[in-house]
Image (cartoon, helix red, strand yellow):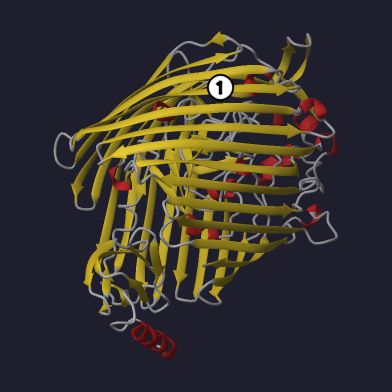
Amino acid sequence: MTILRLVLFGWLLLLYVPGAGAQTVVSGQVTDSQGGEPLAGVYVIWGKASGTTTDTEGFYSFAGNPGKIPVEFRFIGYKSRTEIVNITAGETVVLNVELEPEAQFLDQVVVSADRMEQKRSDLTVSMDVIRSDYLYRTHITDAQELITKTPGIEVLDGQVSIRGGSGFSYGVGSRVLALIDGLPMMSPDAGGIKWNFLPLENLSQVEIIKGASSVLYGSSALNGIINFRTADASNIPVTSFFTEVGIYGNPPNIAWKWWDIPRLSGHASFSHLQKFGNTDLGLGVNLSSDMGYRKYNDESMGRVSVRIKHHSTRNQGLKYGINLSGGKSYKTDFVLWEDALTGGLKQDTSTVSRFHGYYFSADPFVSFGKRDKVRHDFRMRLQTSENRFPVRSANNAGSVSLYGEYQFWYSFSDHFSITTGFSETWSIITSDFFGDHRGLNLAGFAQAELRPVNRLKVTGGVRVEQNILDGEPDRLVPVFRTGLNYQAAEHTFLRASFGQGYRYPSIAEKHASTTLGSVRIFPNLLVQPESGWSSEAGVMQGFMIGRFRGEGDLSVFLSQNRDMIEYVFGPHNDPGSNTSGVGFKASNVEYSRIYGTELEFLLGRQIGKMTATVAGGYTYINPIEISAYTGKSKGLYLKYRRKHTARLSITAASDRLEAGIDMYARSEILDIDNVFLKIETRDLIMPGFYDYWLQHNRPYFLMDGNLSCRLNQSLKLSLAVRNITNTEYMGRPGDIQPHRNFSLRLSGKF
């Protein structure tokens, strides 16, 4: 025990001797039950609004009132423990606690899969969970980058593909639904994800469901969901911040370097969580500016969020509040390169357009639950957004949407419960680009959970949905899902699931009409909804062998879709302007089948005061186009997919130092749109692309690294290097990804 700790402990003893006051000192040390190492940063919580954390040697102390005090100890990777301390005035209590490691994330609580809290090991579907500590360790400030580094997932210029379920549709009509705390975060016009305004401040974790999720979440969840869950305030106020500066190095192809002054980026973030009596408050602010490594592709952005939740004392189990968020973005999107020889990182000036984006949302909510028996949830989201193009004003668009949802959960017994509810989404689009439109989505859903025998869980659900656009109703669409989970042993869980999916075309796919450089986009009023199903079987295995602990997850999956919407290049007509020409139009052209397998693992070990972790994953898919009539393969691969993706991460952390290496590998893209390959059109859109594609469409490997040093208990200095290998690789055609870049960050948490 250090001299400072002895002085502090002695001062506390003098302060709380009998007769000096009514409070009592409780102190002790928290250690690992297996190795005996002290645990720093353990949450020590007592009472309704009091708490502290252990120091670097695992010690803690607090002053409490006489009586029986429940003291809870929480730490990631360990089982929580609660001790009842019975103390009298003036007494000093020493409470040393050993925490038992758990099979890493099997007991992690998630909500996205069945809309209710449950352990991850109880799920019937595959789910990946990204914790906020990974975000901070790797200096990731962009939600797209965070998601695309997950095994089996790729984001192509804003378009998410989970296990090959999506290709690239030019930024519209996402088949993956993005959520913030269970509420949709999609643009009503283009049907895309609003990446810039997804909150990474005060983030608890990101939950990703791999597979059709339309039964519980509706249209746009055909390929899965991504739920960004914000953190709740605890008894211990937490303030976090960071400020960061970054710089791009030279590209591997030095002929592409077009700048004379360094290309810099800067980011700053602030967040605060605190309880005020029975009210939780969360604040978040993020500012960023990126000069960009490509010419005419810079961005500046700011966002702010406020979260208020009140726990009623008059009505036990009643919670209500509101979440507010807003932001502005000023950027120039990258569309087409100048040429492959020297202009791979220069945008063709004919497609350069400055963009101003504005966003605001208000999410009021009320929740009432009683004795783990019944729960009512009512939530709304009022969302407004504007896209303004100072030069290309014909592409301006604005939207207002109102989402409302009521959900009811009731447990009849330990063996049977139901979740049911209904939702509506009302939207108004005002646009010179899409035209003015009114949309309405109405849906009802229900799901039952049955536990007929010990260790077995069976779920089944149905959703009925209808879309109405400009007063014209689409047909009623029912979709179904079912799944089971069986605990075969203490840490062994078997699962299987089947779910149907459905996606109604976005307004952009139906009505967008514009020209970008040499590319013309045509509307298609007759485009039809997409539909399909996905199935999987898997096993999750947790293990603790000596001081090793971790988990592995192996799954096989099969999905099939029909009427998939793809942009087809060719001669088309524009019924609005009564003109014709050559360009792209959204059309129902693909029937697809995808099967594959996925392996993910995590392994951790305590070595003295150092914790070492190895995590990784590998995904294989075979994405083929099938005949609409026979269901047999047509011998063609789906566009913009890769057969193999892999990731391996190694981290080591001690009291003061932390280091990590993240490695990624992907195979070549199997196919792209013919317009980029045909001799008649390939140089019309992107000069030099065909030869570049032949030479550079191959598997690639890249590596990121990070190193941090804790300056004191509150401050940390860290360095991150992305693309250490300086690999040249491409997303969609012409979209060269970032070369080697560096960032230095000062962060604090207190």
In this rendering, position of residue 135 left or right of residue 731: left
Q: Residue at x 53, y 54 (%)?
A: 664
Dot 1: what SS? Answer: strand
Quadrant where the N terminus lies?
bottom left
Q: Is residue 410 visible?
A: yes
Write down the residue under mark 1: 426
Task: Name the spot of residue 556 as percent of width and height, x first.
Answer: 35, 39
Q: Residue at x 69, y 53 (%)?
A: 288
Residue 127, relative to residue 44: is it above or below?
A: above
Looking at this rendering, what residue extends furthest in the front direction? Answer: 19
Q: Residue at x 62, y 53 (%)?
A: 285
In this rendering, position of residue 497 left or right of residue 347: left
Looking at this rendering, what residue extends furthest in the left direction? Answer: 453
Q: Residue at x 45, y 38 (%)?
A: 621
Task: Name the spot of residue 617 as percent of width and height, x first.
Answer: 43, 51
Sort mark 1 into few (<14), some (14-19) or many (20+) by Cα contacts within 10 Å. some
Task: Name the spot of residue 494 as percent of width and height, x first.
Answer: 25, 42
Quarter of the view holding residue 620: top left
